[in-house]
Image (tube, rainbow, N blue to C red):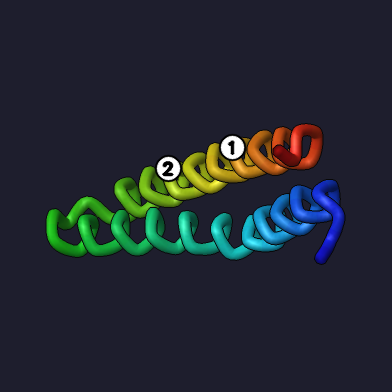
Amino acid sequence: MAPSGEKGTWKALGELSSIGMALVVATVIGLGGGYYLDRWLGTMPWLTLIGLGLGIAAGFVNLFRSVKRAERDFDDPS
């Protein structure tokens, strides 16, 4: 069985390894949503750009939350 300190380290590593995928998924969802709203409403390219910006912002918010959670798990593995 692994020492208790290693469990928090592995959990933090697992959390941090998913950050790249979360950034990409949030950006693609924002871009896709803006694109389809633009096609539906005929407002090219404004909603696409707004959706892209919101997707990027959501990705970075998720990034900062994940890093904070991983840092907390790494510092306090209990």
- Judged left or right of residue 21, residue 10 is right
Residue drawn 47% across and 43% down?
Answer: 58
Which image quadrant: the N terminus?
Answer: bottom right
| Quarter of the figure with residue 19 | bottom right
Residue drawn 35% across and 54% down?
Answer: 48
Q: Nearer the viewer, residue 38 or 18?
A: 18
> Residue 10: where, in percent of width, then height?
77, 58
> Residue 16: where, in percent of width, then height?
71, 54
Kind of residue indicated by mark 2 = Leu
- Judged left or right of residue 44, residue 26 is right
> Residue 57: where, in percent of width, then height?
51, 40
Disc sitting over residue 54 in the figure:
2
| Distance between mark 2 and mark 1 Cα atoms | 16 Å
Residue drawn 62% across and 43% down?
Answer: 66
Query: Label 1 neighbourhood size at 10 Å, few (<14), some (14-19), many (20+)?
Result: few
Q: Nearer the N terminus, badge 2 or badge 1?
A: 2
Q: Nearer the viewer, residue 78 or 17?
A: 78
Q: Nearer the viewer, residue 27 or 9?
A: 9
Kind of residue indicated by mark 1 = Arg
Which image quadrant: the C terminus?
Answer: top right
> Residue 20: where, in percent of width, then height?
65, 60
Query: Label 2 neighbourhood size at 10 Å, few (<14), some (14-19), many (20+)?
Result: some
**Which residue is disc 1 drawn over?**
65
Task: Please state the total of marks drawn on the protein image.
Answer: 2
Residue 51, compared with residue 28, is above or below; it is above
Under circle 1, the secondary element is helix
Of marks 2 and 1, the one in the foreground: 1
Under circle 2, the secondary element is helix
